Image: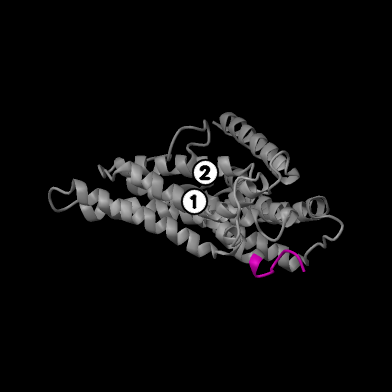
């Protein structure tokens, strides 16, 4: 199990780091974020598939295509400024009004939510035959719009933060903190774990493991800022005060832990051990991004409020 976990993690990490390098260098396409969009959207589709699979285990049957389309629309919304800039750069779009950058992000996401919600209701109206299932199916259809579409949508927002260098700092640091915390908690819990943290939702998680995860997350954050900051941002980079990057690491890591437990809640409630089996040793896509879903919004707020970042 551990061997497959390490192998799958290594492959995923190699692919993501390669794409991140190409994206940071803005190779070929010239717009920050473009190289990461295909993987980001693919993950949203696969995670939606896993949510539909989980609810089907309890015999719930929402219609799939409006769920996919609605979640995709919400996930796509934060990518529109990136795609708009790319099309303008390639001469395929003339943006006279500058709407790609000027329209508020929440407005774009709300449009995606509205389109998806309307389609869900129309679909359930069309297949309605008897009372007792329509309301549940509507609720379950709308759930991925928020859980996947909205929360996962903070990933491109992190990438677009401030500029190319700071955006890459924001994105990588958030994911690094979460995964370092996961890794630290896993190994610390295996070797030192005694006190159960959440015996019903996740029996294998321990308080000792959580503490180890937080320690590793803080160390990883400090090392990343110290060594990667000058490379990604340039000579203008200044290391944030220790209390700031420590607070940032702790907030993001704790959010990631709650994100992990949130997915455990879904799996327990649906009676499934893993959300999927696409990644040997890791489970499904949702098992990989669950902690990131909660951590990304927290990280974004930290960057926007200036806890870490420029100036």
210 or 155: nearer the viewer: 155
Main SS of the magenta segment?
A: loop
Q: Which of marks 1 and 2 is nearer the N terminus?
A: 2
Q: Which of 165 and 85 is in front in this view?
A: 85
Which quadrant: the N terminus? top right
State which region is magenta.
Answer: 304-311
- Which element type, helix, strand or loop, lies under badge 2? helix
Per the rendering, the mark at residue 41 is: 2
- Comparing 111 with 173, the one in front is 111
Q: In this view, does 217 lie above or below 63?
A: below
Specify few, some or many for label 2: CA neighbours under 10 Å numbering under 14, 14-19, or 20 or more: many
Q: Residue at x 67, y 50 (%)?
A: 172
**In the image, farthest residue toward the right:** 235
Which residue is rendered at x = 69% and y = 55% of the image?
167
Determine the residue positioned at 73% across, 46% down: 24
Q: Is residue 95 magenta?
A: no
- Determine whether, in the image, residue 89 is placed left or right of residue 115: right
In the picture, the disc for residue 75 is 1
Q: Are marks 1 and 2 in contact (CB under 8 Å)?
A: yes
Please indicate whether residue 220 sits to the left or right of residue 286 in the image: right
Which of the 4 image quadrants contains residue 103? bottom right
Residue at image coords 72%, 67%: 244
Marks 1 and 2, how far apart at CA: 7 Å
Position of residue 238 measured from the top left corner of the image (x, y, whole percent): 82, 63
């Amino acid at each position: 199990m551990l061997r497959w976990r390490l192998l799958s993690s290594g492959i995923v990490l190699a692919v993501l780091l390669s794409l991140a390098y190409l994206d940071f260098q803005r190779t070929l396409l010239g717009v920050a974020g473009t190289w990461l969009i295909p993987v980001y959207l693919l993950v949203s589709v696969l995670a939606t598939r896993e949510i539909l699979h989980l609810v089907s285990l309890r015999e719930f049957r929402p219609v799939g295509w409006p769920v996919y389309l609605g979640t995709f629309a919400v996930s796509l919304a934060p990518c529109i400024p990136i795609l708009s800039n790319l099309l303008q750069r390639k001469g395929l779009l003339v943006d006279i009004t500058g709407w790609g950058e000027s329209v508020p992000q929440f407005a774009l996401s709300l449009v995606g939510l509205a389109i998806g919600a309307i389609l869900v209701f129309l679909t359930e109206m069309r297949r309605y035959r008897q009372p007792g299932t329509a309301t549940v199916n509507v609720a379950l259809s709308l759930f991925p719009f928020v859980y996947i579409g909205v929360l996962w949508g903070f990933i491109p927002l992190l990438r677009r933060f401030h500029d190319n260098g700071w955006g890459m700092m924001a994105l990588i640091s958030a994911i690094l903190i979460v995964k370092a915390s996961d890794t630290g908690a896993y190994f610390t819990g295996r070797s030192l774990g005694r006190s159960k943290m959440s015996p019903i939702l996740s029996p294998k998680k321990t308080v000792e493991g959580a503490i180890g995860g937080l320690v590793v997350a803080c160390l990883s954050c400090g090392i990343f800022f110290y060594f990667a900051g000058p490379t990604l941002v340039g000579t203008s980079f200044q290391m944030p005060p220790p209390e700031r990057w420590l607070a940032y690491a702790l907030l993001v890591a704790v959010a990631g832990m709650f994100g992990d437990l949130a997915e455990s809640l879904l799996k327990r409630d649906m009676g499934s051990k893993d959300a999927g089996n696409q990644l040997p040793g890791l489970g499904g896509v949702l098992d990989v991004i669950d902690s990131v879903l909660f951590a990304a919004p927290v990280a974004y707020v930290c960057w926007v409020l200036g806890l870490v970042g420029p100036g």
